[in-house]
Amino acid sequence: MFTLIIGGAGSGKSAFAERLVQSLPGDRVYIATMQPFDEECRRRIERHRAMRSGKGFATLERYTDLAGLTIPEKRNVLLEDLSNLIANELYSPDGRGGYAALQGVEAVLRRAAHLTVVTNEVFSGGTDYEGDTLAFLRTLARINNTLAAEADTVAEIVCGIPNVLKGEIP
Amino acid sequence: MIFVTGPLFAGKRDYIRSALGLDEETFAGIAVWDVQEQAETDRPEALAAELAQNDIVIATEIGGGVVPIDPEQRARREAAGRLSCLLAERADTVIRVCCGLPQLLKGDWPC
């Protein structure tokens, strides 16, 4: 089973995704993709760690090459988040491009009992982009759409509440 | 409390005012809007609790664009989003309005 969760900044998408994965029976794995570049990233990571603590997640920090990641089979996996993974694959020295991000997610999906991916709605603030920003947005949008087509369930989170776009919330 | 959210200029205020059949003056007495502008605070829960005393609370969604480079703008967007989550938790009814069309996210239609 595959669930895609999308939302804007501060929409409550992470909290919703965690609750969802927590409600599933079985062991839980959290794949964290944010690199601790600076103080703000570290605070963000810390905030998410605090949110997850006590919820039974085994955390794997992995910034690129999810296809090369060995996770135990049949786990309920929460991947957070797709935007960071794609940025890492596009811009990190060891990154191998947007397609590697998609392949990585699909590799995790094959091993997981249930995969939940958190991604970002960053597409309704204008259209006037260029260079790296434009390339990043195009890549993220293409992968969002590809994963949404593959997913059993797609929900956009609005002020913490799911607006179900496809399937049903497991 | 009815919480109404949605993008900028989506018709949030017009929708809820006319759905409830209120004139401008009555509406202004029981509703607060643009509450996203008050979101930056050290006490978001207290702010949400205070705002939730109103019958109608309206917030514009501002978190759906590209993440701003400026840290203050970034923080402002997140604070606005989190305030909306807190208000939605406290609301009996949550409605999102897009192009003037309402979508019920929580509770029952108010009319």
Image: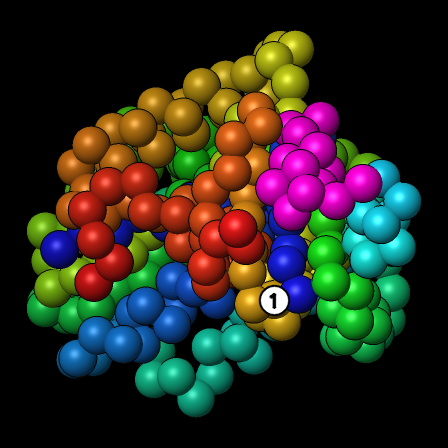
Q: Is residue A110 magenta?
A: no
Name the residue beneath numbered marker 1. B91
Q: Tell me what residue is drawn at x 39 percent, y 69 percent.
A: A18
Q: Chain of mark 1?
A: B
Image quarter of residue B15: top right
Image quarter of the N terminus of chain B: bottom right
Q: Tell me what residue is drawn at x 55 percent, y 43 percent.
A: B96
Q: Is residue A144 visible?
A: yes
Across the whole image, how many numbered discs are drawn on residues?
1
A43 or A125: nearer the eye?
A125
B34 or A106: nearer the eye?
B34
Range of residues picked out in magenta: B9-23
Name the residue at the bottom extreme: A54
Q: Tell me if mark 1 has few (under 14), some (14-19) or many (20+) residues whose alpha carbon lies within 10 angstroms of its own.
A: many
Q: Position of residue A20 (x, y in %)?
A: 32, 68
Q: Tell me what residue is drawn at x 62 percent, y 71 percent.
A: B90
SS category of the residue bearing label 1: loop
Q: Is residue A110 above or below residue A44?
A: above
Q: Tell me what residue is drawn at x 79 percent, y 64 percent.
A: B54
Q: Is residue B44 left or right of residue A15?
A: right
Q: Is residue B11 magenta?
A: yes
Q: Position of residue B56 (x, y in %)?
A: 72, 56
B96 or A88: nearer the eye?
B96
Looking at the picture, which amino acid does disc 1 mark?
A: Ala
Q: Position of residue A127 (x, y in %)?
A: 61, 13
Q: Is residue A76 above or below residue A111?
A: below
Q: Is residue B66 visible?
A: no
Q: Position of residue A60 (x, y in %)?
A: 36, 67
A120 or A58: nearer the eye?
A120
